[in-house]
Amino acid sequence: MAAAGAGHATGVRAGRARERTHPVGTAQGPAPEHPGDGPGDGPDRRWPALAVCLTASFMTLLDISIVNVALPSIRTGIHASQSGLQWVLSGYALMFGLVLVPAGRTGDVRSRRAVFMVGLAMFTATSALAGAARDETWLVLARLLQGLAGGILVPQVSGFIQQMFRGAERGRAFGILGSTIGVSTAVGPLLGGLLIQAFGPHEGWRWVFYVNLPIGLAALPLAHRLLPPPPPPEDGRKARGDLDPVGVGLLGVGTVVLLLPFVQEQQWKGALKWLLVPLALAILAGFAGWERFYARRRAPLVDLTLFRQRSYGLGVLLSLVYFAGFTAIFFILTLYLQNGMRYSALEAGLSIMPFALGSTVAATVGGRIVSRFGRPLVAVGLGMVLAGLLAAALAVHLDTGRTVGWATAGPLLFAGLGSGLVIAPNQTLTLSEVPVARAGSAGGVLQTAQRIGSAAGVAAVGSVFFSRVGAGHADWAGGFQLGVLTATGLAALALVVALLDIFGGGSRPPAAMSRPCEGLAQEPRPAGRG
């Protein structure tokens, strides 16, 4: 046992030495696999570890969409006000976006496994707290804490994928993550509808939160057993002063101020709320200036030089714009079907399922082939999304009866297939040249862009939608069609970003991604391993 442990430590030190010579994600050479988790080191625990990560990620992302269909049940169950219901939704999103980057950086500097387990334990406990809520204030506070826990947990997932996988295997792992994102977003209304139908309109909403408990309790011991521990510090001492508290504060305040007018768009009347946007941009500009200053002496919260990499800078921008349109579709479709067509929560969830199925299949395939096709694959997916959304708007225009769910099934399936070729491949390409030591914070920035895009998109598309619904006679179909056209315009902007990357020389995948994963198994191992 002692000899095996010494060999393991030798392998870690040798692997880190190679990483300093050839940074991870660059074209100079393959980085080592995580000791004990790759081929030739006994059972390959990387894929079971990924399953644990994705299960936890699914829970946190599901809780963004599943609550939408539970709002009427919450109103009935605890007599919540409209403002309270809005904070049940927006409070989660605000806290989630607030901690993504700091939590990612903490995992990079300290221990991804420890931070992941803290986030998972918090999320499980706060889910129980939310389900047991007796009044509006209790539920809102529980949702704030639940969002905080989700934001701590999620950036560790992309960090673990960067750490555990290389080459084409990394693309496959991100493909499965993309499937998880698509399914969690689209299946939420269906699962929520099933739970409310099973447990009744008064108490069914509680099980929207309680469903997380057995999953979280089962995942915690598996996370401790399967997730890789942090490698030992190179100098034998823990890194200190790398969490950049001033940067954390500036980024947190800037993110919240930027998100607030979007998530409260329906509650805060008047135009004064939009003055928060330039204020937020000024705070974020101050954050960028501080990070440049801090980087001269210590490791900053966000390494701004990452944005000089074409794959990362354009990938973050594409993700922000695409999520603005992608997330808003489910928001207005659920409202149109439930309020306009009098669908039950379960019927509305079933109507959205074609998108989820298409996204699941295509994300898995996209993750496998992105190393061959690069950014053009994302452009093809965006084109499919545009065509599918326009066809869905046309279907609603032609079919004004209760069969509209069937009429939109084909277009939504096609759009879902396209979306699966966007989210996972774009995430793979965006993080392909990011060093593992920065994987958590870089992934946190990417996910923060997704959350900001989602909030802005729901506000913009929702505003267009409600402009028709709130008119003299509620034109639900017309509001949905205008909303879809707005979301399509946002997806078209994402396509422009992808084309800029392609025609600017970024169409080929990075060299590190093109390397077959089988080559990793043939890499010479340090003495003492296997």
Image: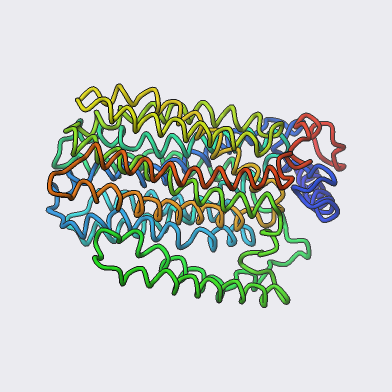
Camera-nearest residue between 392 and 280: 392
Q: Position of residue 438 (x, y in %)?
A: 66, 57
Q: Is residue 294 above or below residue 119?
A: below
Which residue occupies the foreground of this view, 115 or 441?
Answer: 441
Residue at screen point 39% across, 71% down: 276
What residue do we see at 70% from left, 44% from top? Answer: 503
Query: How many numbered marks does the figure carry?
Result: 0
Q: Residue 516 in the image: x percent, y percent?
A: 77, 31
- Is the image coloured rainbow, by chain, by secondary structure, or in one colour? rainbow
**150 lies left or right of 473:** right
x 50%, y 43%: residue? 492
**Quadrant of the rendering where the N terminus is positioned:** top right
Task: Inspect this view and state whether residue 43 appears.
Answer: yes
Left or right, residue 400 beside residue 429: left
Percent x, y for residue 143? 32, 56
On the rendered image, what quadrant is the C terminus found in?
A: top right
| Image quadrant where residue 273 sits | bottom left
Q: Quadrant of residue 275?
A: bottom left
Residue 39's x, y, as percent? 74, 31
User: Can the viewer see residue 117 in this picture?
Assistant: no
